[in-house]
């Protein structure tokens, strides 16, 4: 019977600690700082999506330019005629 009393103390301590941690978590989530952080996170996610979309468009443009024939004309080196100095 004494062992029940010995187990009751640590078990009650665990329940109390859990209650303290969950109580603080609820307060932190509703704080103005967490709202600001959530808004900043959403803005960053939107910007990241825009950048990813822009990157996708640029990759498509790069692929299309690599596949199309080039309009660049290559110049070949021609040896200049030798001049004789007289």
Image (cartoon, helix red, strand yellow):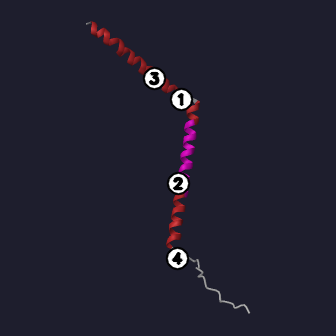
| Residue that badge 2 annotates | 52
Disc 2 is placed on an element classified as: helix
> Where residue 55 sits in the image (x, y, percent)?
54, 58
| Residue that badge 3 annotates | 21
Measure how far apart labels 4 and 3 are at the Cα level: 66 Å
Is 36 rendered above or below residue 54? above
| Residue that badge 4 annotates | 69
Q: Which of 23 and 58 is in front in this view?
A: 58
Disc 4 is placed on an element classified as: loop
| Residue that badge 1 annotates | 30
Q: Which of pointers 4 and 1 lies earlier in the amino acid sequence?
A: 1
* Mark 3 or mark 1, whichever is nearer to me: 3
- Residue most toward the top? 2
Residue 30 magenta-drawn?
no
Query: Which of the 4 image quarters holds residue 15?
Result: top left
* Mark 4 or mark 2, whichever is nearer to me: 4
Is 47 rendered above or below residue 4? below
Please report the residue visible at 48 percent of the width from the left and 26 percent of the height from the top: 25
- Residue most toward the bottom? 86
């Amino acid at each position: 019977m004494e062992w029940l009393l010995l187990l009751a103390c640590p078990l009650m301590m665990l329940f109390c600690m859990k209650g303290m941690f969950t109580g603080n978590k609820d307060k932190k989530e509703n704080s103005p700082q967490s709202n600001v952080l959530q808004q900043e996170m959403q803005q960053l996610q939107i910007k990241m999506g825009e950048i990813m979309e822009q990157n996708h468009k640029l990759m498509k443009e790069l692929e299309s330019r690599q596949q199309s024939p080039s309009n660049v004309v290559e110049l070949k080196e021609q040896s200049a005629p030798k001049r004789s100095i007289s």
